[in-house]
Amino acid sequence: MPCFICETCGTQYAESSSSPSVPPARCVVCEDERQYVGWNGQAWTTHEALASRYRLRIEDDDGLLGIGLPGDFAIPQRALLLPTDAGNVLWECVSLVSDEAVAALRARGGIDLMAISHPHFYTSMVEWSEALGGVPILLHEADRAWVQRPSKHIRYWRGDELRLSGDVTLVRVGGHFDGSTGLHWKRGPRGATLLPGDALQVVSDRRHVAFMYSYPNYMPMKPSDVRRMQALLAGYDFDDVFGYTWKRNIIGGARAAVDASFARYLQAVAA
């Protein structure tokens, strides 16, 4: 039975036992005000159909192995392999799994766990976990309702911080989603590194980050959420920030860039 995938956001849904060949009537992720239904209406694909259309991009992104789909499908995020003291972490997820990508990860020691920042990037996380041997998927409990394909491999965590090792900590920064998660890694490719998903989105000048509740619909984040995020991240140092997609990174001076971005945003919304 197919697990249908939304063409607009890339979310994979669970199999339907009642109508296995019929896709869901709607995508609840796209109907949420942070996302949108495609301009030509709700459209669906399957993993097999996606594999016939696309080949995954597998290449270096500023010192980390990245895996992503071409930019004309859904949201153009890429997943990253993080070789940490907590094991090999696959950070974020994409809708397509391929033998080539799985082989590339296995050649680098495989994957010990997956962690995903927020529901827009859950995509085919269960498909990936199963292809990688049933590795655990770490998601924040606050976003449990957005999971469209439940699995025994999903592990929910609570609170504001989850320390995975001496070097790796998951941080519930919130704002974009209640459970929006960043990953702080003390020993990234060049030193301390923050991977914040969409909660702090690296902007086009790659000298600042943005704080948006909805990026496609241009809804700013609540100032109270930004202040909470600012306070939560105050205790973390980092040299680099890896954004949500290819080369959307701040390499060097990232702590100062994020601090300046907090100040700029809070000044703008107070004016």
Image (cartoon, helix red, strand yellow):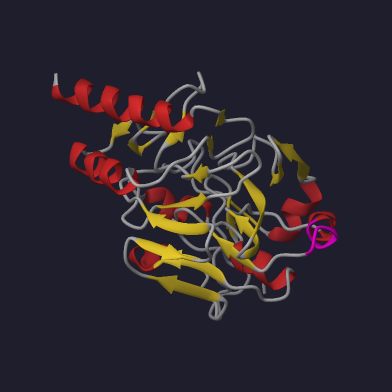
Would residue 2 be seen by someone viewing this image from the given angle?
no
How many dots with numbers? 0
Q: Is residue 70 above or below residue 5?
A: above
Residue ranking furthest to the left: 271
Q: Is residue 36 left or right of residue 57?
A: left
Q: Quadrant of the C terminus?
A: top left
Bounds of the magenta span? 105-109
Residue 130: x and y in percent read 69, 73
| Closer to the camera in the image, 124 or 229 | 229
Would residue 266 be seen by someone viewing this image from the given angle?
yes
Q: Is residue 101 left or right of residue 29?
A: right
The majority secondary structure of the magenta stretch comes to: helix
Residue 137, quarter of the rendered image: bottom right
Residue 230: x and y in percent read 29, 40
The structure residue drawn at horizontal position 54% and vertical position 57%, both measured from the top left corner, is 167
Q: Quadrant of the N terminus?
A: bottom right
Q: Is residue 217 left or right of residue 24?
A: left
As for residue 15 lying within the magenta part, the answer is: no
Residue 122: x and y in percent read 53, 58
Residue 170, quarter of the rendered image: bottom left
